Every structure is written in structure tokens, then in C-alpha cells.
Amino acid sequence: MSNQQGFVVPEWLVGITLILMPMIVLVASIAPWYQRANMATLMAQEAARTMVLADNWETGEADARQIALEIAANHGFATEAWCSAPGPGCVTITFGGTTPGVLQRGTEIAVSVEVPIPGVVVPGFGSVAEFQWAQSHAERVDDYRSIVVEP
């Protein structure tokens, strides 16, 4: 038989460092990923729905941006995080559809939202990297909806 003595402290430190810490980082990173992905989905859905229910494109876009801004603010984004062009660290929203700029019966309104998501979250230190997450949603203007046409 051989001697079964070991070094408890070094083995414990290696076990904590190589096994437990990566698991803690992974678990800490999952919640922000889901939160931001759900935020992007909600922003796209609500903005598209607001556009479809609007009287015209301009007021619909303004109302949709306001709703998206409120959703982002509720998730901790300041107004400074909004950008006009997609890029790192920016929250962007773009509107399009079958005929952009026109709200007519039967047209589809597409809304695309892009939000930053932290790549790795280290508890006690913050996030290390970041990537952009894009989400889009399309809504159809009701075929039988009455739309007020301004003369």
C-alpha cells in the first residue's frame, strides 16, 4: 500500500479557482443576458404595436420611441445610451416595413432594436466585455382599420 497523504489547502484552492469560480461567473452572466434580450424583444413589440395603432407615421414613430425609451429607462439605461447609428454600447431603434414612412391598411411595420449585452459579468468587478443584441418585430396594420387622411 502507498501513503494517501495530500495537501488540503493547495487542492482546495485549485478546486475553487478552476471549478467553482468559472461556474459563479457563468451563473452571474446568464441573468443580464436574459434581461437585455427580453428588454429588446419587449421594446420591438411595443414600438411596432404603437406604430400600427398610430394615426400617421410621424406621431407613431415619436410615440414608439417614447415607449421604447421608457422600457429602456425601466431597465437601467440612461438617455445617453441612445444612439442614432448602431454601435458598441448603444441602444438603437429603426423603423421600416413594406412602405416605410406610410401607414396604410395591410402594410407591415417592422421595428428593429439593438441593445448592448455584457459578455462576462464578474461578481464584485462588473462586466468585462460587451456585444450587441438585435431583435426585430413586425406588425400588420389592420385591413379594416379606419385611418384618418388629412387633406
Image (spheres, grey):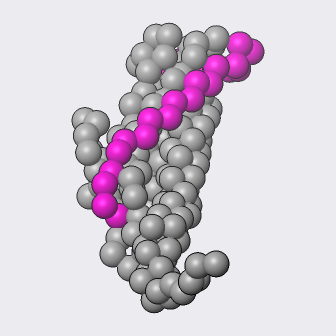
Tally of numbered tags: 0
Q: Which residue is pictured at 63% across the width and 13% down the height?
A: 105
Q: Position of residue 97 (x, y in %)?
A: 48, 17
In the image, is 65 to the left or to the right of 5?
A: left
Q: Is residue 34 above or below residue 23?
A: above
Magenta span: 127-151
Say if residue 145 shows up in the picture: yes
Q: Nearer the viewer, residue 126 or 15?
A: 15
Rendering quarter of residue 126: bottom left
Q: Which residue is pictured at 53% across the width and 38% down the height?
A: 44
User: Would residue 134 be counted in the magenta stretch?
Assistant: yes
Q: Position of residue 88 (x, y in %)?
A: 26, 45
Say if residue 43 shows up in the picture: no
Q: Which residue is pictured at 56% across the width and 83% down the height?
A: 3
Q: Nearer the viewer, residue 61 or 34?
A: 34
Q: Is residue 131 above or below residue 56?
A: below
Q: Position of residue 1 (x, y in %)?
A: 64, 78
Q: Nearer the viewer, residue 45 or 99?
A: 45
Q: Is residue 5 above or below residue 82?
A: below
Q: Is residue 15 above or below residue 64?
A: below
Q: Which residue is pictured at 58% across the width and 24% down the height?
A: 138
User: Would residue 39 be counted in the magenta stretch?
Assistant: no
Rendering quarter of residue 50: top right
Q: Residue furthest front?
A: 1
Q: Nearer the viewer, residue 48 or 42?
A: 42
